[in-house]
Amino acid sequence: MRKISISDKLILVFLFVSTISIFIIGYYSFYHAKKAILERTFNQLTSVRVVKTHLVEKFFNDCIKEIQLVNSSSDIKKILAQINESDSCSNYEIINDSLRNLENEFVNQLSKKHYNRITIIGKNRKVFHLKSNADNTNQDYDFLWQQSIISDSLYINDLTKLSNLSQPLVTLSSKITDSSNQVVGILVFEISLKAINAIMLEDNPSNGLGISGESYLVGHDYLMRSSSRFQSNSVLKTIVKTEASIASFNNNPGTQIIKDYRGIEVLSSYSKINIPNLEWAILAEIDYEEATIPIYKIRNEILFISVFIFFMVLMVVIIVSQKITLPIKKLNHAAHEIGKGNFEIQIKHKLNDEIGELTDSFNKMANKLKEQSEELNSERIKSLSSLIDGQESERMRLSRELHDSLGQLLIGLKLKYESCLDQSKLTSETEDKFYELGLLFDKTIEETRRISNNLMPAALSEFGLVSAVRNICNEISETTKINILFKSEGNSNDIDSKIKTYLFRIIQEALTNILKHSQANSASIQLFFDKEFVKLLIEDDGVGFDKSNIKSQNSNGLNNIKDRVALLKGTCSVKSETLKGTQIHIEIPLRKKIL
């Protein structure tokens, strides 16, 4: 399992918390921005609807007032009286031409109004047009007469499209009575669709409804009563049976998001309109896609800011986590170094928190371990020095004992043997045995000398280090198949006797290892002396070894060499590779105090 560092954990935690925070804040901002924009759009649509409602209602109220005013006019009654003086007819007959002389200033004023046609119908079914902007058209005058008679004041006929007119009409009719309250005729105002569209239809995007917004009227049969912005000839043709129109006729005005008559999602504001005798609803709508353009712009800005904040937080988190974990990493590295035996390490810091206190404690611990290690090492070196010096003293004593005591006794014994041999008469058989005994005496004396010399070479004390090393190299070269080359440079006479002895033992130990383990064909010993150092280089062309896999029992020789070098305050480096031989480089200072 992959190890996750403290720095990575801190980064992940900070990023998780910051990401959640950014997401919550971004979502909250987007949600409320969307809500605010939709509410603002609904308010705008409601404002448009209210204004349009007021304008439409005012328009029809003005028309009602005008027809009532005209109805009570004496001029109209004079015209009607002249119309009724003519003979009755079975069908409604237009008599405009015969009454042209009745036109006066009042009639001319009515002609300037926004009505498509103003008509007076007498009780004799004679029809007179005070104003007419269309060709003669057969209105359903009988229906209008009947409805006007029934109505208390006036009758408004819903938008109707006549067969020979391109535009539908709304008709207002009012009965005209005489002084005895008898109906003598009716007055008819025809309102064209253009007048209604002038209020409802918006083609200019700058008027508050944008590119896709519109306001329109719907009748109780769910057919349009004003022109659509997007469909031509939509009046009395386009069905608008949507949630908004249904709610309007159920007297539930309001706002909501719906599908409009085109099947497009829109924001709609709707209500019923209050016009006598007309069941109309008014709707103000705008496409959802256009209304939400600012929302998605805000969304993109929130996403951009969120990504920017995320990377800023990431940079800050990385820097902060590194500052937090750097002292911990230093402590971890220092702990590993102490585990390797390096007690010199000290961690510098400027922290005043718990990590700073931990670092101070660690430094104190490292100093304490260093002191204890130095004490232990000093005691070990002293013990080792005492042990090695004791061994050397014992070797010297044994060498002297062998040379002075046992050696002299053996020589005396041999002399006695030779004296007895000269005075005795021996047979040929006993002479051979005594001869073998003499050889045994010689061999014993020679072996005693060799042992004594190995314990403490006479050449070392009598002729010096170089001579002793040369002798041992020559001896090994003569008795084995390994060719040993010895080289010496510099003066060794002024070197301390202890250094000479230790160097000799080091060389002796190294040569023993070469003989036992190296399988070498040749080796070299090089000694270099100067005023400051003694340098020793030992090389062989043997099989070498892997230092990481060397067994402890096979490393005793190297450990002995390193121990002696340490006692001399020197340095020792060993280089070896499998099948590439071994090299030992030793450097001994001459001016340091030897333990």
Image: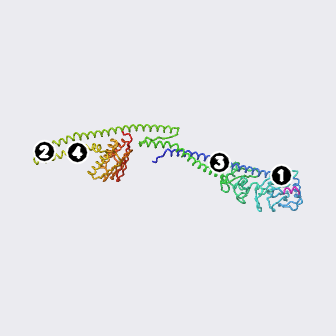
Q: Which residues are magenta?
A: 104-111
Asked if residue 110 lies in the magenta stretch, the reply is: yes
Residue matched to label 3: 33
Q: Residues within 10 Å of mark 3 (few under 14, many from 20)?
A: some
Q: Position of residue 249 (x, y in %)?
A: 71, 50
Q: Residues within 10 Å of mark 4 (few under 14, many from 20)?
A: few
Q: Which numbered disc covers residue 68?
A: 1
Q: Which numbered disc covers residue 422?
A: 2
Label 1 amino acid? Gln
Label 4 amino acid? Glu
Q: Position of residue 549 (x, y in %)?
A: 36, 48
Image quadrant in which you'd find residue 93: bottom right
Contact, mark 3 vs mark 1 (Cβ under 8 Å): no
Q: Position of residue 499 (x, y in %)?
A: 34, 42
Residue matched to label 4: 447
Instruction: Give the prevailing secondary structure in the magenta stretch.
Output: helix
Q: Helix or strand or loop: what does disc 2 sit on?
A: helix
